[in-house]
Image (tube, rainbow, N blue to C red):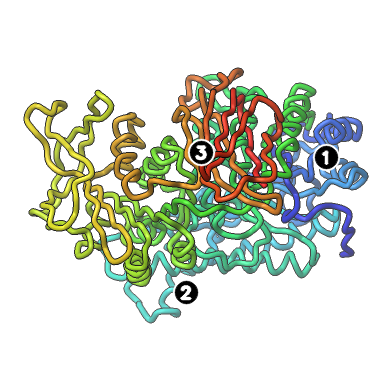
Amino acid sequence: MADTGDTKSRRDAFFGLHFDLHAGAQDTELGADATEAMVANLLDRVRPDYVQQDCKGHPGYTSYPTTVGTPSPGIVHDALAIWRKVTREHGVGLYVHYSGVFDVAAVKQHTEWAREDAEGKRDERATSTFGPYVDELLIPQLTEVIEQYDIDGVWIDGDCWSARIDFSPEARAAFTEATGIEDIPLDAASPHWAEYLAFQRDRFLAYVTRYADALHAAKPSFEVASNWLYSTHVPQRPAAPVDFLSGDFSPGNAVNHARREARYLASNEMPWDLMAWGFNRSEHYGRAYKPAVQLMQEASVVLAQGGGFQVYNVPTRAGWVDDAIVETMADVAQFCRAREDVSHKTEPVPQVALLMPGQSLYAKQDRLFGGWGSALDPVDGVLHALLELHYSVDVMAEWALKERLSRYPVVVVPEYAVVPSDLRLALRDYVAEGGTLLLVGHEPARQFDDILGVDFVGDPEDTTAFVLEAGVACPFAGVWQNIALTTAECAGTRYGVPSSHEGGQCGASVNAHGKGLVAGIYGPLGTAHSRTHHPAIRTFLGNVVGRVFPEPTVQVDGPPWIDVSVRRNDRGLLIHLANLAGMQMATPYSAIDAIPPSGPIRLTIPMAERPDSVALIPSGEGMTTRWEQGALRVEIASIAIHEVVAIS
């Protein structure tokens, strides 16, 4: 297949649109209302770099007239052909949405293709990566789409997050052949359980590699992504030959989900984007479409980490994209484009590195991949508290952190983490050479007990605890480790009751070690903050971090809902400020149509020399600056949603 070369690759693409229908047997009007004029109007108004269009969803039926798999009986017009014609005329890339492991029709028609549980029951949704599905349907069908429509790439949905532990005869035989182990483990109590899960994770990646290689062979410029691959769902070094990373974050608690995933994806050093849902889902009322301002706020936390952004909407079953969606997307696109030059493909200015404990998740969770649910509360809670304290935070897996340790002034290890031995040694050297390490929770602390400057008193115990900060008390219950100070200083006190009257005991410490510092918080701060977001917990953490990292690159005087991300590109230092006031979190509140402006926001940036220029992008107004005593001082009157202070 010849390459047209008319469109941007995903490495350079910045803003996109996604449409899927998950066509099924009950459809009767697929493509009936899809017209060239409708698509042209959308592309003219929104001007995306690419569109991801429906092809095959989770039910397993295609919305185009396939000769390889199972077309929906409801196809009236070939909408994919219309989208291909008009996107090509507009120089817009066309990718397809295609469900991978998750294929109901395939496993119904070919039960032997299905994954099998430990009791021998075949799955009604998930295919087996040990079976012939990838060779007999996925690759032939997508090759057909390449040949028939000359599409630019594929976004494969329902892949890693749909993969489940497989006990099919094929999976068992493959494991025995590879390892020599004949007694197949059936649960976490069985010998060789960890090996069985690791083997199946490797098999999933081999499955991705197989289809990616085949599709690249069919069209060398073809670009492949597997939804959520090498995100926190699959927290390991990228190795499979995908071309970009992507995922669709939660439609409800969207901002918080995107805050974590954007920071993690950015650490992989691959092209990436995140997809917002253009609507919320209600159990009782179905889709509730989001106003543009809500999507702009969601976009801001993605743009601040250097990624691309796309929005998912659902057309009618007949393929019509309503003008209301078009206008909302045009407004969101304009918001993003105004920030593209100071957002896309920027690099982090290392400040605080937060470990994403991927190997711990693999070891402790009885599933192949994420989403990990509440197991990520320790990470999210620490991340949110640090962001509320206005620290610029990068989230990364063990492999990435080890390679970049020397760049970061502060490294935070969250509770729950079992630090691999090689990283543990590297962190000790990091502290000895002048780095700062913060250990949250009793598990990480015990792995560095000899450098914390404390003695552990007894075993960790599940106990009632409170912190008293800023005049208020907050419950901080969970597993705590009692300590006795030796060379360390106490940096935070916990109490057994919501009062200081009875006295407390040390709950956090700071110790000098070599040229650096090591701090410990001996209770479940991340979990507690994730579940309460109480300001007293944030303040408790702030008191500790303030002692070990008193002068970050940017010091911010502003409310806790201002997210700060310190970035850089060839134009200079970039300080992203995202106003997250009023962000949607609870399902009964499905949409927000107003974000209260926040200000004034004051920044102090230590600088040896006066900068040549300081600009506020994109507003260009409402900012005053002065340089004095080796620091640039910036005051911004008000931030509506997202501004960037560009310094050169």
Instruction: Give the mark toward the camera: 1 or 2.
Output: 1
Q: How many marks?
A: 3
Residue 540 image offset from top left, x and y in percent: 28, 37
Q: List the single residue furthest toward the front.
A: 629
* Earlier residue among tags 1 and 3: 1
- Residue 282 horizontal/vertical position (percent): 53, 24
Residue 24 found in image quarter: top right
Residue 193 can be seen in this image: no
- In 3D space, how far apart are the residues under numbered discs 3 and 2 (Cα atoms)? 59 Å
Q: Residue 174, labelled with which disc?
A: 2
Q: Quadrant of residue 245?
A: bottom right
In this view, the mark in front (3 or 2): 3
Q: Which mark is residue 302?
A: none
Label 3, residues with CA under 10 Å away: few <14, some 14-19, many ≥20: many
Labels 1 & 3 near each other (Cβ < 8 A): no
Query: What's the residue at 41%, 58% (across, down)?
Result: 358
Q: Which secondary structure, mark 2?
A: helix
Neighbor class of circle 1 (other Cα within 10 Å; few <14, some 14-19, many 20+) is: many
- Residue at 14 percent across and 34 percent down: it is 495
- Could you tell me which residue is drawn at 89 percent across and 64 percent down? 2
Identify residue type, mark 2: Ala
Q: Residue at x 24, y 29 (%)?
A: 474
Residue 79 is marked as 1
